[in-house]
Image (cartoon, helix red, strand yellow):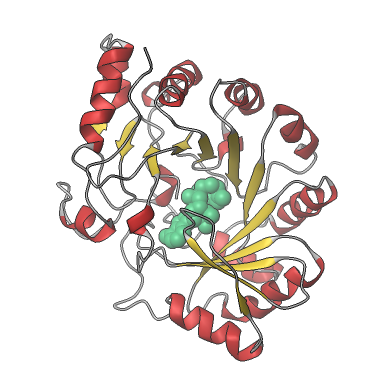
Amino acid sequence: MNAPRLYDNHGRLINYVRLAVTDRCNLRCFYCMPEEGIQYVAREDLLTYEEMLRLMHLLAGMGIEKVRITGGEPFVRKDMLPFLRDLCRVPGIRKVNVTTNGTLTAGRVAELQAAGIHSVNLSLDTLDPERFRRITRRDQFDAVLRTFRELLDHGMPTKLNAVVMAGKNIADILPMVELTREHPVGVRFIEEMPFNGEGSHYPVLEWNHRKIRAYIQEAYPGLEKLPDPPHSTSANYRVPGYRGTVGIIAAYSRTFCGSCNRIRLTPQGLLKTCLYDDGVFNVRDLMRHGASDEQLRDAFLSALGNRAKDGWEAEQNRTFGLPVTESMSTIGG
Ligand code: SAM
Ligand code: SF4
């Protein structure tokens, strides 16, 4: 008998899971984590690789086809590569993608490819080493650039994620668009969200998706709108004649919720049916209390049967309260 597919109460098919494999990180990005005072999840509270693989088998049976590995920084977790290899072999999972800060991946891109990783999103908010140090509070720019070059050399489908921050990296927007002239990469500019462990940095988000687009269009009046793939969170563009593309992600303005096809699992096994909710149930606890596959499937179906229609409603329904202050390193982006 086939397991039921994962539909939510708004008729949206869920075929994509974002799996945050750790909350630990070797950078301290301004928009993601406070500089000090971080309380990491105890190791025994993290989902084990066995638990994650069990869940991915189960979810693949319910129609999940795509998994994104995120964190924290995935590659600070020991034995990540063997886990990725196992994950890429789960029947039904067609694409395993990784989001990484690129500090620990230089010299390992061939292994990622051999493991079966389909694409990499590399977080890089600036092309200037000093601004990189100020944003990430660490001196790792060269390592990230090495990863970037290696991704390109290996022909790995690559996107660059840049969070746009007033007063921090506005001067990088146009040079990053320029990267798409030579390189077949997707450079994506992301609205800054308040998930930094402390709460919003601004009373009103100045650099929203409209302002980012207008700023790029002023420099590139011929900027072409591209058709957006189904479920895309980015509005996509190309400078005519350039090899790569430019994406703008309205992560704070939440313009894309209507076609959302994704769920999230945090490092300690909390299911989030929206980035902005505060978790629906803990699947690790169910597994450690001996839940059968059928009980786990029922728990997922029931969570999705009661899903907020968009990120605004999910935020309003939070039981931990408002405003949003978690660190993105505990969610995975
Ligand atoms: N450590 C990896 C990395 O940086 O790529 C993976 C985890 S990180 C939380 C995933 C993505 O979330 C990154 O692309 C990062 O830029 C983005 N992100 C983190 N905090 C954010 C925030 N407050 N607003 C918007 N994007 C954020
Ligand atoms: Fe670490 Fe990624 Fe968060 Fe930066 S965005 S602090 S690299 S988890």
Q: Nearer the viewer, residue 321 or 109?
A: 109
Q: Residue at x 85, y 49 (%)?
A: 153
User: Residue 188: where, in percent of width, then height?
Assistant: 58, 64
264 relative position to 247: left or right? left
User: Residue 254: where, in percent of width, then height?
Assistant: 35, 64
Q: Residue at x 34, y 50 (%)?
A: 275
Give the total number of marks visible in the rendering.
Answer: 0
Q: Residue at x 43, y 30 (%)?
A: 63
Confirm whether residue 285 shows in the render. no
Confirm whether residue 105 shows in the render. yes
106 relative position to 227: left or right? right
Q: Residue at x 75, y 54 (%)?
A: 148
User: Residue 28: where, in percent of width, then height?
Assistant: 51, 54
Quarter of the picture containing the N terminus is: top left
User: Residue 93: where, in percent of width, then height?
Assistant: 55, 29
Given the current orientation, which residue lies at the most extreme front position? 1
* For residue 218, above or below residue 22: below
* For residue 40, above or below residue 301: below
248 relative position to 198: left or right? right
210 relative position to 98: left or right? left
Q: Nearer the viewer, residue 153 or 256?
A: 256
Q: Quadrant of residue 94?
A: top right
Q: Nearer the viewer, residue 260 or 5?
A: 5
Q: Nearer the viewer, residue 90 or 289?
A: 90
Q: Quadrant of residue 123?
A: bottom right
